[in-house]
Image (cartoon, coloured by chain):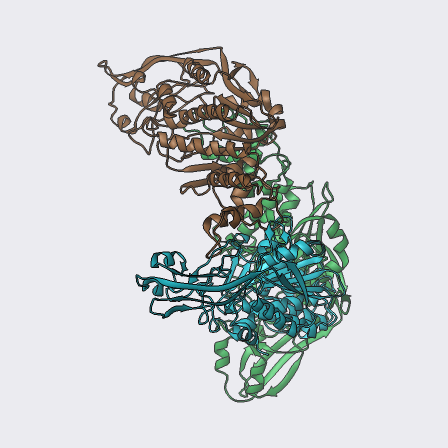
Chain colours: A green, B cyan, C brown
Amino acid sequence: MRIKRTIEDLFYMPRSIISEPTRKTMRYIKKHIPKISIIKFKSGKKVFDWVVPNEWNINDAYIMEPNGKKILDFRKNLLSIVYHSSPVKKWISRAELLKKIHYDDKLPNATPYVTSYYKKDWGFCMPKNKVKKLKKHKYFVSIDTTFKKSFLEIGEYFKKGKQKKEIFFSTYICHPSMANDNLSSLAVQIHLINYLEKKYPKSNFSYRFVFLPETIGSISYLSKKITILKKNMIMGFALSCLGDDNQYSIISSRHGKQLSDLALNSALKGKKKLVKFSYLDRGSDERQYCYPGVDLPVTGFCRSRFHSFKEYHTDKDDLKYVSEKGLKNSFEILKNIIDAIENKNFFPKNKFLCEPNLGKRGLMSTIGKKFYKKGKMIKNFLVYADGKRNLFEISNTINLNLNDTINITNKLNENKLI
Amino acid sequence: MRIKRTIEDLFYMPRSIISEPTRKTMRYIKKHIPKISIIKFKSGKKVFDWVVPNEWNINDAYIMEPNGKKILDFRKNLLSIVYHSSPVKKWISRAELLKKIHYDDKLPNATPYVTSYYKKDWGFCMPKNKVKKLKKHKYFVSIDTTFKKSFLEIGEYFKKGKQKKEIFFSTYICHPSMANDNLSSLAVQIHLINYLEKKYPKSNFSYRFVFLPETIGSISYLSKKITILKKNMIMGFALSCLGDDNQYSIISSRHGKQLSDLALNSALKGKKKLVKFSYLDRGSDERQYCYPGVDLPVTGFCRSRFHSFKEYHTDKDDLKYVSEKGLKNSFEILKNIIDAIENKNFFPKNKFLCEPNLGKRGLMSTIGKKFYKKGKMIKNFLVYADGKRNLFEISNTINLNLNDTINITNKLNENKLI
Amino acid sequence: MRIKRTIEDLFYMPRSIISEPTRKTMRYIKKHIPKISIIKFKSGKKVFDWVVPNEWNINDAYIMEPNGKKILDFRKNLLSIVYHSSPVKKWISRAELLKKIHYDDKLPNATPYVTSYYKKDWGFCMPKNKVKKLKKHKYFVSIDTTFKKSFLEIGEYFKKGKQKKEIFFSTYICHPSMANDNLSSLAVQIHLINYLEKKYPKSNFSYRFVFLPETIGSISYLSKKITILKKNMIMGFALSCLGDDNQYSIISSRHGKQLSDLALNSALKGKKKLVKFSYLDRGSDERQYCYPGVDLPVTGFCRSRFHSFKEYHTDKDDLKYVSEKGLKNSFEILKNIIDAIENKNFFPKNKFLCEPNLGKRGLMSTIGKKFYKKGKMIKNFLVYADGKRNLFEISNTINLNLNDTINITNKLNENKLI
C-alpha cells in the first residue's frame, strides 16, 4: 500500500488534543495495527506542571456580513478557526473582529493554524489578503463548539524482543488538516511497524511506538512510563514532518552523541540536503523526552524541519506538499536503522589479525593498481571492525552511508571474514 | 564618581617598581579602599629566580645642545627617559647619543615607554621624527636619578565570604604616565571593590584583589601566598588595559576551560569586537599565575590587548585614549561575573520533570505560532538547568549573554520554576 | 655518501616478493649495515589469512610482430610485464593481446607497474599511446619466467638501548625499478641507521628497523614478532616514497594521537606543503601495523604520498623524479625525531616556580619593548615545560618546529633552567 494513502484517508479532519476526530484517527491506526493498546488520561488530571484539558468538538463556525454572506466558513477550511475556541454567537464591529483574526505575514494567501489550548479564548484564521479587504460594517461571528470531560488517548504498540533493551519511536496525532505536519509521520510510523512485524517477527531488540497528542501527550505518557523507558530504552526517535522530499533534518538529542544520534547521522550520510540542528533548535516531543531528569536518548528526525518551510502551520501544508517519494525515503532511513541494529553483526569483529586476502575471495581486484573503490571501502570497514564499534559508529568513521555499510557487513559475513 | 577621575588623579606621575610616586599611588588607593593592607618585600630579597630591586627616583633629566637649548626635558614628558636609568651628567657626541636613544618605528611622533629594570643602563626616549633632526655636534646629557634600599609594596584587599572559596582579581600599578596601560584597570578595580562592598556586604564567596608592580610584584606575592591561593581560589582575573572602547580581549588561562575562562566568555558573549587569545599570547601577570606548578585558574581580561593597539607603551596612550564609556563597559563585564556567582541560583535546577507550562505564567504567548523569541530563550535555559551546570556554562551553551542569562534566572526564580 | 647513490646502485633490478634480485638487494643492505639479521619464511607457509608465495624469476619477455620485430622488450623496460606472470610462448590475435595489456590512462607515455601476486595470470604493460597503434595481425608473446619453492626474506636491524622501550621503522624492498616507490625509503632508512650508530652508540631507547616485502612481508613479520612489538614499541614509522621534494605527507595511525603522530606533526611543523591524511587514506604497511588486534603505534611518512603523484607506479618514477635534496630533507625529519627522543630533557621541567629572569642570562632583551621573538618562544617553551609534556607535545602546543624546539631545550639546559 502507498504510504500517502494513510494521509489521504485522514486529511479532512479537525483533530485537536481530545476530540471525536482524534478518536476516529486512533481507531484508524488501530485498524492497521491491531496490537496497539490505548492508554487513557482523564481530563483534569495533573501531569507534572500541566493539566489534561477537556474534550473539544466543533460543529460549525462562520463570519457573516450584514447581507447574510458568509465571508469565512469553517466547513470550507478546517484551519479557519483558532483551535479550542470557546463558543460565541454575536454581532461585533470590524475593529473588534480584527482583534480576533490571525493571519500569516509571509504567506498572504494562506490560512494559518493557530491554537489556544490553555487559555480560554476564541478567534478566526484567514489569509492576510482577505483581512485587508474587510469592509467597515458589523459582522456576525458564530463559533459552535462544545467542551466536556473526557479522556486523552495515547496509542502504544509494544513488540517484545529477545532482549529487554528497546528502541522507541514517537509521533503526534493532534494536528488537524495538515499533511506534512504531521499525518506524514503518523503514516510512516504505521508502515514502519508493519515492516518490523513482517521482517523481524522474532526481533532481537524490543520496540515501542507511540501515537499521542504533542506536548501534553508526551508529558502524560512520561508521567506514567518514565521508569520503564529509562530502564530499557537504548535509542529513540521523535518523528515529525516526514512527507516532503526537500531535505533531511536531524535534531540532536540534548546530550548529543547518543546511539540515536549516531544512527541517524549514519543513515543520512551522503544525503545532499542534510541539515543538522542542535538541541537548541528542537521543537517537537524531543523537548520532553530529553528534558533534564527525563534524559532519554531521543533524537528528532524531520525532512524540512518544523518552522523551516514556509508552508508550515498553514493550509498550504496540504496533500500536494507531500509526496509518496518523500514518504518512502523517510521510511527507508528508519528501516535502515532497524536493519542495522537487528543485524547479527551489529558489532562486527574481524576474524584475522592483519588484513585478509580479499583478492582470492573476489572482493577486490587481483591485478592492476592496488586500490579499487570497492576494495577500499571493504578494507576501511575491516580496520574498524574491532568488535567494539557498532555499525553506526563504523559508518560514521569510514564516512559510508549506513545502507552501504550493512551491505558490506552482509558480504563479509557470507565470506566468513567477520 | 566617574571611573576616569581616578586615572586623571594619578596620570602625571613617574611610577616604577619601587619609587615615591608608586608609594603615593598606593596611598591614593588606600584612601579609596581603607580596608586594604600593604605587604612589603625588602630590596635585595630573593623571590624564586628574581631579586627585589632598589627604590629608584628621578629628579630631572634633559639633553642640552651646546647653545644651552634643551632638546629633551623630562619634566615635559615623563616617558622621555629609560626607566631605572643610572645617573649620568656629561658631554657626548651625536653618535654616542644615538646609541642611547629609543624611539617607536611605527609612531614617528610618539615617545615610547622603555625600562631597564634588571641591567644597569641609561637612555632617553623621543619621537623618531625628532631623532632624525639631531644635528652633528656635542650634547650634554643629564639624568639625575637615585637608587636606595627600600620596600616593594603590594596592596591586598580581602573580603571574607560565607565560603572560603575565593575569587581573585589582580592589576599592576608600576607603569608611569599612561592611561590605558594601566591606570584604567587600577581604576576599574577600585570601583569593582566599592560595588562589591555595597552590593554584597555578606557575600557568599570570599574575594581577594591585589594592586602590585607587574612581574616582580606578582612573583613576590606568589612567593608568599601561593599555598592559600592554590587552596581557595576558584577563579581569578588578571586585568590590564581596560580603558578604551575598541574591542574586548580574553587571554585564555594556561589550562583553558577554567571557571574564569567560562565566566569571561559568557560575560562577553555577543560583543561584536571580541578577540580570544590563546595562552601563547599572554603578556601580563597571568604569565605568573598560570605558570606550571603555580597553576591558578586565572584568565586575562583586556579591551584592546597589550601589544595590539598602536598607542601601546607610548605617550599616545594618554587621557584622550581612554573613555568613561570604555571603563564603564569593562566594569559591567566584571560586575556581571560577580552578580552571577553570587546569585543563589548559580546552579539553577528545574522544579519539574518535562517542560513547565510557561503560557499560564505569562512567560510565553498562549496563542499563535508556538515559539516566540522570549519563550524560546527561557525554554533553552530550562533544558540546561539541570542543577549540574552553572550560569556561565548555561550562558555558553544556549549562546546567551551572561547578563540576559541572569535576568532569566531571576524571572524563573520569581515564578518558582527553579 | 650521497643518499641517492643507494637508489642508483639498486635501480635497474626486477625485484618482486621473492626473487634473485630481491635477495641481491638484501645483500646490498647487509653490506652497508652488517649487523642486520635475516628472518626467513618458507614458501607455502600460512601467515594469518595468507600464504607465502613461491620465488619468481624472469629471464626475458617480449611481444613480436609477424615480421620478427619486437614491439615490447622486457630488457629495455623492467616494468613492461605483469609481475608474477606465468610463462607463456604463443601466437595470439590482436584482440586476445589487448586483454592482456595494461596501461595508464592518465600518463599515455608511461608504462605502469602491475602485479598479480596471488592469482595465476600473465600480461604486459605498455604506454597507452603505443597500445593505440597496435596493428590488426597476429603477435608472438613470450614470457620466460620460473617459479620455485624458496624463502621470503626480511632484514631486521635491532639496536639495544638502555631501555627496552623501542622505536620502530619499516620500509619495503619488493618493488622493481622505481626510484621514489620505494628505493628512496630504503636509502633513507640505511642512512638513518648509520646516523644512529654513529651519534648514539649508547642510545637510551632501543631501535628496530625492518626491510621487507610490502603486505605479505609485514604480515609474516607480525606473525612472528607481534608479542615483542606490542610489549616494547612506543612509536613506529612506516616509510614510503621519501625521495621527491614536492610535499610532506603524514598518514595518521589508526587510533591517532599516538606518540608517532605527535612526533611527525612536530617534526613537520612549518613545512609549507604538508598534507595530513587520515588513516582512511593509508596504503602501505601501516595497514598491517595498526590493524585491530595488532594496534601498534605506527604512523605513515611520505613525501608525495603513494597514489598522490602522477608518476606513481609507472616508469616515470625514475632516477630523475627523486633528488638528493628531497632525500636529505626526509632524512632530517626522522633524524630530528631521534634527536628529540634521545635528548635527556625529553620531558623538560622548569627549575623555578614563576618565570625565570631570562634577561640576566642573555636569553631576552633587557631593554625596550618587552617581548622579542626569541624571548617569546623560550617563554612559551617554559610555560609548557612542566615535566609532564614531552618535546613533541611542547612543539605542537607552542607551534614551533621540532628542530627549533630541540635547540631551545639545549639552550635552557646549558643555562640550568630545566
Q: Quadrant of the C terminus of chain C?
A: top right
- Residue B156 vs A96, above or below: the answer is above
- Residue at (36% x, 29% y) in the render: C324
- Residue C198 vs A108, above or below: the answer is above
Along the viewing direction, whichever of C234 and C136 lies nearer the viewer: C234
Along the viewing direction, whichever of A115 and C147 lies nearer the viewer: C147
Task: Answer with the quarter of the image where residue B38 lies.
Answer: bottom right
**Percent x, y for residue A160?**
73, 45
**Percent x, y for residue C121?**
41, 19
**Percent x, y for residue B1?**
60, 79
- Residue B410 vs B231, above or below: the answer is below
Along the viewing direction, whichever of B393 and B56 lies nearer the viewer: B56
**Percent x, y for residue C31?**
44, 15
- In the picture provided, is B353 more to the left or to the right than C403? right
Q: Is residue C329 visible?
A: yes
- In the picture provided, is C80 more to the left or to the right than B212? left
Q: How many marks?
A: 0
Task: Answer with the quarter of the image where residue B376 lies.
Answer: bottom right
Q: Quadrant of the N terminus of chain C?
A: top left
Q: Is residue C142 visible?
A: no
Along the viewing direction, whichever of C341 and A137 lies nearer the viewer: C341
